[in-house]
């Protein structure tokens, strides 16, 4: 027997949406206003979501519990697995002393902390996002910036803002490929449309990032570097997404951006450098040694890049997942929940197949990279296990929090409460193009994944566009493009940023991190709404056609 979702249990979508939003309000309110610890806020939000699913939406109790358990396990595997191994690589680099050498080399590009933010938070983070995704860029770049002397809250805020432009293309184009499968739309046209939206925002984000760091006056001091970083990233993103496809957009854009910025620093430096104060400067000084030691500092990151890139290749990824990640049908939940119109054309049973990703491709690639780097740096198996044990102990509470966050997200997904919110926004008629990116933004904020948001709302965007005689390519693409702005406030990213920048007396909690980035996320998605509105009614030539 299947349970059909009901998106208006109180008789109207609008009234039902007021109830459906309560889990999110509970979570964000406890985090940002009452400053409750993230794990307790997530647990409270989960309880509210479960009660609404059972009492208001009449979801069977066993399905509600199965959905929450499914989300909780997914939060650990693969998301927690990836984050754990990303932090392991960083800790290995620090404990072998190679991170101190890396600090000196990165400082050699520019001693100005604004330039370092552009290079690491934006460009390098985009490279990791294009290769791995799932929180790895936030974890790695946050730890890197702390080691370079950035204050913990500053580092957390900057890596979250920087991790926007590449998210729509994610790990090897998976969000766009998934969106095409869900909607039946052409993957190349969707890729091109997203490139024509985010390509413009990629030029803006570096300026926005530095302004959030150093104020508008500080940003004006390095505007040429912001321009070089943004234009090279945005132009590459546009060209690759339009003329090749979504697969290598993140990696190509980030690589060109990093090389261009490093090259530009050879011929230009800001008139007044913003360096670290004595209180925030890196405590460890790189040891003097032979030049041969310089390349060793990059070993963990070289292995990371190579292993993650190889694991993302379809043949390698399929081999690893077939070998170590068997697909398991979730008891009670698989094909037990039915999605109904107008979200889909015909009532469709929602599959619940869990790939047991304890040894999935991306997470395993990070672990292999760390082990290989450690062996090359002279560590033995016992030392590697000790470092890994310390890493696991450090992130134990955060892994629990992420698990609870995903349990909340999956409960809202399978109960249909998040779809109620999407339908409420879809009922805006002429203004729907403006609200279309906000649906994607809300989806990512709830699920922590642009891919999941596309699965959740891709069909809704397509069906609504057809009813309003708009381009389904435009609205479906805007779901993914708008979703990236929600990446900086989703619970998973907030917790990862808090973990990556933790361990110091002034390290921020999750609520403080959320408050620091929420206004940036909202402002950027509203700007995306304006752009999509213009593309729908004024600049229609920007929409690709066959």
Image: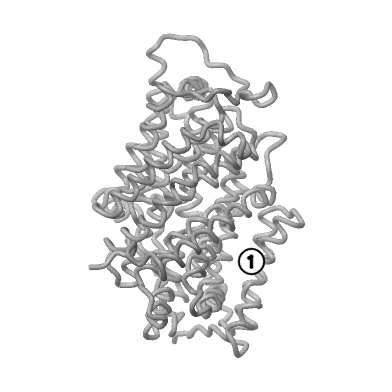
Say if 531 sits above or below 499 in the image: below
Residue at numbered disc 1: 24
Say if 424 sits above or below 292 in the image: below
Instruction: Tell me the residue at 63%/72% (across/down).
Output: 21
Label 1 neighbour load within 10 Å: few <14, some 14-19, many 20+:
many
The front one of 357 and 428 is 428
Residue 207 in sight in this render: yes
The front one of 197 and 484 is 197
Q: Residue furthest right?
A: 34
Say if 402 sits above or below 433 in the image: above
Residue 387 in sight in this render: no
Quadrant in the picture for residue 464: bottom left
Q: x, y (%) of residue 112? A: 55, 26
Q: x, y (%) of residue 22? A: 67, 71
Q: Where, quadrant-wise, is the C terminus in this rendering?
A: bottom left
Instruction: Tell me the residue at 62%/50% (across/down).
Output: 517
Q: Residue furthest front?
A: 538
Q: Residue furthest bottom?
A: 11
The front one of 485 and 265 is 265
Q: Secondary structure at mark 1?
A: helix
Q: x, y (%) of residue 168? A: 41, 55
Say if 298 sits above or below 493 in the image: above
């Amino acid at each position: 027997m299947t349970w059909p979702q009901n998106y208006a249990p109180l008789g109207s979508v609008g009234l039902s949406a007021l109830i459906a939003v309560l889990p999110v309000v509970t979570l964000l309110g406890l985090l940002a206003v009452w400053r409750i610890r993230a794990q307790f806020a997530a647990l409270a939000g989960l309880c509210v979501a479960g009660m609404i699913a059972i009492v208001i939406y009449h979801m069977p109790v066993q399905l509600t519990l199965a959905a929450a358990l499914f989300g909780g396990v997914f939060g650990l595997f693969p998301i927690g697995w990836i984050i754990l191994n990303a932090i392991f690589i960083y800790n290995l680099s620090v404990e072998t002393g190679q991170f101190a050498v890396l600090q000196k080399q990165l400082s050699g590009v520019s001693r100005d902390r604004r330039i370092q933010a552009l290079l690491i938070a934006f460009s390098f983070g985009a490279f990791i996002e294009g290769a791995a995704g799932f929180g790895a860029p936030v974890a790695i770049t946050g730890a890197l910036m702390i080691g370079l002397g950035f204050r913990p809250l500053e580092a957390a805020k900057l890596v979250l803002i920087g991790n926007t432009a590449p998210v729509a293309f994610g790990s090897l184009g998976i969000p766009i490929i998934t969106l095409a499968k869900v909607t039946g739309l052409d993957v190349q046209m969707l890729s091109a449309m997203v490139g024509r939206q985010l390509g413009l925002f990629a030029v803006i984000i570096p300026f926005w990032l530095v302004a959030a760091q150093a104020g508008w006056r500080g940003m004006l001091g390095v505007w040429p570097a912001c321009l070089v970083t943004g234009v090279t990233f945005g132009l590459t993103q546009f060209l690759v997404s339009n003329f090749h496809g979504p697969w290598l957009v993140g990696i190509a854009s980030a690589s060109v951006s990093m090389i261009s910025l490093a090259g530009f620093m050879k011929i230009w430096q800001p008139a007044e450098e913003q360096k670290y104060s004595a209180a925030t400067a890196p405590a460890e000084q790189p040891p003097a040694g032979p030049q041969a030691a310089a390349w060793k500092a990059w070993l963990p990151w070289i292995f990371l890049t190579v292993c993650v890139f190889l694991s993302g290749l379809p043949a390698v990824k399929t081999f690893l997942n077939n070998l170590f990640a068997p697909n398991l049908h979730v008891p009670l939940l698989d094909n037990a929940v039915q999605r109904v119109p107008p979200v889909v054309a015909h009532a469709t049973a929602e599959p619940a197949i869990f790939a047991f990703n304890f040894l999935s491709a991306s997470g395993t690639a990070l672990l292999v990279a760390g082990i290989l780097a450690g062996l090359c740096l002279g560590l033995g198996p016992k030392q590697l296990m000790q470092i890994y044990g310390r890493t696991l102990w450090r992130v134990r509470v955060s892994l629990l929090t992420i698990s609870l966050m995903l349990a909340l997200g999956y409960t809202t997904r399978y109960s249909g409460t998040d779809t109620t919110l999407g339908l409420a926004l879809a009922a805006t008629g002429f203004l729907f193009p403006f609200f279309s990116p906000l649906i994607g933004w809300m989806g990512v904020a709830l699920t922590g994944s642009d891919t999941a948001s596309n699965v959740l709302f891709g069909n809704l965007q397509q069906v609504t566009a057809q009813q309003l005689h708009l381009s389904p390519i435009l609205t479906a693409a805007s779901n993914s493009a708008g979703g990236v702005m929600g990446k900086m406030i989703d619970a998973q990213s907030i917790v990862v940023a808090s973990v990556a920048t933790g361990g110091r007396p002034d390290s921020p909690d999750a609520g403080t991190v959320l408050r620091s980035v929420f206004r940036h996320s909202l402002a950027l998605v509203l700007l995306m709404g304006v752009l999509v509105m213009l593309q729908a009614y004024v600049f229609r030539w920007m929409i690709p056609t066959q």
